[in-house]
Amino acid sequence: MALMITDECINCDVCEPECPNQAISMGEDFYQIDPAKCTECVGHFDEPQCVQVCPVNCIPVNPEHVENRETLWQKYQRLQQAAQPASGAGGAGGSTTAGA
Ligand code: SF4
Ligand code: SF4
């Protein structure tokens, strides 16, 4: 599931740097989460980091973006691939199976 930030947000700035996916940014009035980037921290941490640090508990699950763990994991892998130049810099691993 992607998470979302409600209007209870006090713009304290602590969650934004904690997000491993850079999914959090300042919105019009308060911070917001890009559901395309939020993996609920799957792939990085056991717990959603933004929820851990938010002092006012204003980061619930986004009901419009309910995803299971498998979907979140795939999103995480897509984000990782997008974040890295596809120049094959690196050693072992990286078996890219072009499956469905
Ligand atoms: Fe970022 Fe994790 Fe919070 Fe999603 S749950 S916005 S990935 S810190
Ligand atoms: Fe808003 Fe909570 Fe993030 Fe602070 S930690 S900016 S209150 S969502």
Image (spheres, rainbow, N blue to C red):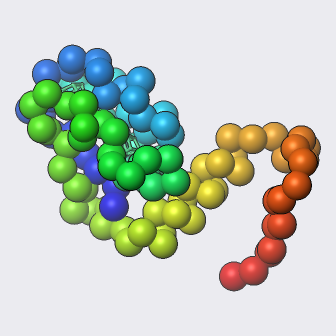
Q: Residue furthest top?
A: 12
Left or right, residue 82 beside residue 56? right
For image coordinates 27% across by 62% down, the residue present is 64
Task: Determine if residue 25 is in view.
Answer: no
Relative to 1, does residue 49 appear above or below in the rendering? Answer: above
For image coordinates 34% across by 39% down, the residue present is 49
For image coordinates 24% across by 56% down, the residue present is 62
Relative to 8, does residue 68 appear above or below in the rendering? Answer: below
- Total numbered labels placed on residues in the image: 0
Left or right, residue 72 beside residue 48? right
Task: Indicate the position of residue 11 as horizontal and vertical percent values.
Answer: 21, 20
Task: Indicate the position of residue 19 as horizontal and vertical percent values.
Answer: 42, 34
Please state the quadrant of the image where ligand 1 appears: top left
Rendered-image quadrant of the C terminus:
bottom right
Task: Indicate the position of residue 17 as horizontal and vertical percent values.
Answer: 41, 24
Residue 25: quadrant of the picture: top left
Rendered-image quadrant of the N terminus:
bottom left
Relative to 92, does residue 68 appear above or below in the rendering? Answer: below
Task: Indicate the position of residue 67 as horizontal and vertical percent values.
Answer: 37, 68
Pick whichever, 6 or 19, lies toward us: 19
Task: Determine if residue 64 is in view.
Answer: yes
Left or right, residue 25 beside residue 97? left
Left or right, residue 75 beside residue 30? right
Residue 83: quadrant of the picture: top right
